[in-house]
Image: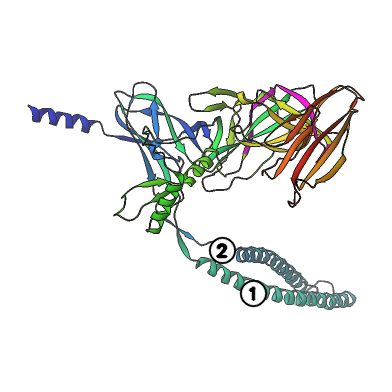
Amino acid sequence: MKKQIILLGLMITASFPTLANTISSRISSVTVYLNGAQVYRKAKTSLSKGTNEIIIDDVSPYLNTKSIQASTSGSPLILNVKHHIEYNDPVSVSEPLPEKIQSKIDLLEDSLFYQNLQLQKIRNQISNLDQEKRIITNNKTIRGEGKSDSLAIFMQAVEFYHEKLNVIENQLLELQITEHGLTQKVSSTNRELSELRNYSAHQKVQPQVKPQVHQIILTVHSDYDTEAEFFVNYLVNRAGWIPSYDLRATGAEDPVNLTYKASIYQKTGEDWDNVKLTLSTFNQSCSFTVPTLAMWEIQNKTELKYNQNQRNMLGYESTDTTMVIQQQSFYSNTLIPTNNATAAFTEFNGAIASNGFTIGTQQDQFILPKSLAGSMDKTLSNVEFTIKNRYSIKADGKETMMVVSNVDMKSHFNYISVPKLDTDAFLLANLTDWRKYNLLPAKANIYFNNSFVGETDIQPSQMSDTLALAVGRERGFEITRKKIEDEAQEKTISSNIKREITIELAVKNTTGETAEIELKDQIPVSKTDDIKVKQLNLNGARLNEKTGILSWKLELAPNEGKIIEFSYEIVHDKDIEVI
């Protein structure tokens, strides 16, 4: 009974052979990561009852085979998904003619065509003259067969015959000479053309291999004939996006506009034609293994360096990210992380690497409409931006610039000046809510009143809650700085030199409106006990004890001015040279 059931199963299986069907598919959407992309394809086909093999051609040769996923609509069941490479047989192809030789053949063929036309024209003229000569020669009057016996008429006929035949014979002679020359030229052209054609016919035949075709093969079972739609997605490398920003300010009373831009590049081997794009800040990984934490040992850094040096002396080998112990007699198969491991991870996390081909720089100084901006969705591990418009991106590695978002940011403006270095005032835009826009480390172009001001680096991990950007110089302040007192007195008792310095800052508001301005200056900071710095009069300045930076915040009415004096004292031994 058991054998009968097995035989029956084999008969049923044999009655439904696997049907192979190569179908066309299209890329419907792509999620682009900082390094890599997830490609989504759609395809529709007919399924026969039984097991079907669906072949999707021309997928990216750079796909990660472990990342392929497939699903289908309706009742069909996907039994297997695999990646396959179709290798094409070589095809014998003649080596192409050098361009110079092919041009010569074309020129000779044209010359031969016109030479034959000229030769035919000459031969037609010769034929016509021969015909005219025969007509004259066969005339009855010339041959004496005419009925008229008038001698005068006969003499006129003979004279005409003599003159006309001389003309015809001369013309025939000239035409025959021309015919001979053209015949020689045609023969020469034919010989030269024949030699070049023989060279072309004996060109080397080389085998040409067509590119490999990468395929995704789906094994699908259906209980009946039906139509089904398939959805396939996979990860590819050699793609990514690079963030950049435009910050625009039109005046001190208006908000600062932030244009969040992205330059998308891909060299995946398949064009993205009119696809829906999503940009993700997530660094994709194909591993589905849950990471585990190893024991974290705290060690003395000095001792650790000493031990590592000792191991290197014993013959251990160091790589960029790990120090691998080579000798089997010491700590076999142990990996000791080095400092470079962190640096390598940071570089990858910042999307600096480009998978083996260079990414060029590109700037866009046009004002981009807010209508192009997309939506932003936060997930547990990343931020995704959905781009509204569809884009076509060729697989040529060139960058395609697009808008991610466009927002007006809360900001307030003030002026700042550092007269010790520059007596101009600078307009600062202070952005207070920039963190909620999930900015990435990138370059930012700054524009003020539709003029390009300069470029800055945005580093979200290192910045404070307020992002201050200089958007331009302001000539509406008159600012001066001068040293009004610098006295040095030597105290003979203690052998010290005491030096007192007074600085005067003067500022006047000529902007025509009330304005806030911050003045910055400094006093020295001593790094040794042998030199002492004493604050005498800082005139209400806010002092940073670590850096010695002084700052005054002033509010000045139109044409209002203010003078600030501050003084400090330096005491040091007379034998010490102070710098």
Mark 2 lies on residue: 97
Q: Quadrant of residue 437?
A: top right
Q: Position of residue 238 (x, y in %)?
A: 51, 43
What is the distance, in whole Å, between disc 2 and disc 1 at their CAs?
A: 22 Å
Q: Secondary structure at mark 2?
A: loop
Viewer-proximal residue, 330 or 198?
Answer: 330
Q: Residue furthest left?
A: 1
Viewer-proximal residue, 140 or 13?
Answer: 13
Question: Is 516 on the left-hand or right-hand side of 176?
Answer: right
Mark 1 lies on residue: 188
Q: Secondary structure at mark 1?
A: helix
- Label 1 environment density (alpha carbons within 10 Å; few <14, some 14–19, many ≥20): few
Q: Residue at x 87, y 40 (%)?
A: 485
Image: 431 above or below 567: above
Amino acid type at image mark 2: Leu
Q: Residue at x 35, y 55 (%)?
A: 326
Q: Residue at x 74, y 52 (%)?
A: 575
Q: Quadrant of residue 531?
A: top right
Residue 42 seen in the current view: yes
Q: Quadrant of residue 438?
A: top right
Q: Position of residue 131 (x, y in %)?
A: 73, 69
Q: Is residue 312 magenta?
A: no
Question: Is 340 on the left-hand or right-hand side of 509?
Answer: left
Question: Is 401 on the left-hand or right-hand side of 488?
Answer: left
Q: Position of residue 117 (x, y in %)?
A: 69, 64
Amino acid type at image mark 1: Ser
Residue 321 seen in the current view: no
Q: Position of residue 313 (x, y in %)?
A: 40, 58
Magenta stretch: dominant secondary structure = strand
- Range drawn in magenta: 400-423
- Label 2 environment density (alpha carbons within 10 Å; few <14, some 14–19, many ≥20): some
